[in-house]
Image (cartoon, rainbow, N blue to C red):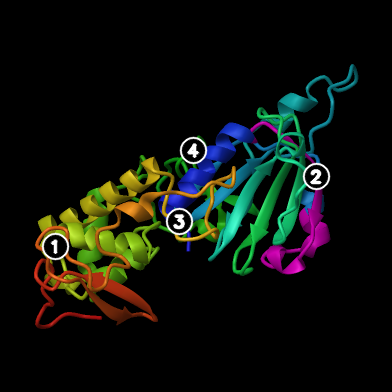
Amino acid sequence: MPELPEVETVREGLDRLVVGALVRDVEVFRDYSVRRHDGGPVGFADQLRGRRILAAVRRGKYLWLPLSPEAVSTPTADDPAAEDRAADDPAAALLAHLGMSGQLLVRDPAATGTWEHPHRRVRLHLTGAPSGARYLDFVDQRTFGHLAVTDLAPTPDGAPGGHGAGLAAVPEPVVHIARDLLDPAFDRDATIAAVRRRRTGIKRALLDQTVVSGVGNIYADEALWRARVHFARATDTMTRPVVGAVLDAATAVMAESLAQGGTSFDALYVNVNGESGYFSRSLAAYGRAGEPCLRCATPLRRDEFMNRSSFTCPRCQPRPRHGRW
């Protein structure tokens, strides 16, 4: 599943290539991809058509494009302020959750040719994009992702909604999602306190998107390896410095991954240009069972965890006597 660095890589691409574009038309090729939208495919298209994309914003693994509050029309002598009104604070946004394999691809057939992706689910026809792009395609092989046009709600803390936001608002389905480690408004002390209040294992706390968002299985393992903390360590037994070290390690590993365009193991994650990220080449723990630890050369261990896997160094990350899985 795409995690914070992968989704942020997509957000940056959308910010460069489609913000300011007008949605001229919408095609829904698979109804299930807009299943979370009230009104179905027809209502989804109707709410997008004629609106301008005002920004590209991310919180954790959620990505949204705030929309002009009314359909944009060409200013005329009778209504010269039509474009200005459409640029007022947005009341709705196109919300995207990429699921396991979702991709948002910006396409210009004049430059990329006429080939169509076999798993294209939704297409936005654009005009006026800064890049000259004609299409924004939602591609999803495994179909766990979805798009929806949702109302915006005020942020509980009054700060901008997420990375790339100028407005203190988030889509209603995202209100319960905590801020992520790269969010300018992230409160480190409050998050440390929230982690220590949990009676769970530290990895479960990292994966809880209501505690801190954007951390998934890969980056949790990498952060815990860097901090020398076992995934089953009980959060209510951890000191503030130890929890802080885990959060700082997660911040560092995700910043490094972002610099390399995210982590790709196959073609299921790419950026908006269809290019893969390369951080998988820099992983120290995840997926390296049986290989030597990069610190102490002890063979790394794989354990089953929440129907997934956890990778640890038995020497650097000793299992706690009384941990919580």
Does the magenta segment cover residue 36? yes
Dot 1 corresponds to which residue? 228
Q: Secondary structure at mark 4?
A: loop
**Quarter of the rendering occupied by the C terminus:** bottom left
- SS type, badge 2: loop
Front residue of this view, candidates 208 and 185: 208
Task: Residue at 30%, 65% (x, y): give it.
Answer: 286
- Looking at the image, tell me whether mark 1 or mark 4 is earlier in sequence order: 4
The answer for how far apart the CA atoms under marks 1 and 2 are is 51 Å
Classify residue 77 as left or right of residue 55.
right
Residue tagged 3: 264
Q: Is tag 2's residue or tag 3's residue first in the polypeptide sequence?
A: 2
Q: CA distance from mark 4 to mark 3?
A: 24 Å
Q: x, y percentage for residue 153?
A: 56, 51
Q: Is residue 85 magenta?
A: no
Disc 4: which residue: 164
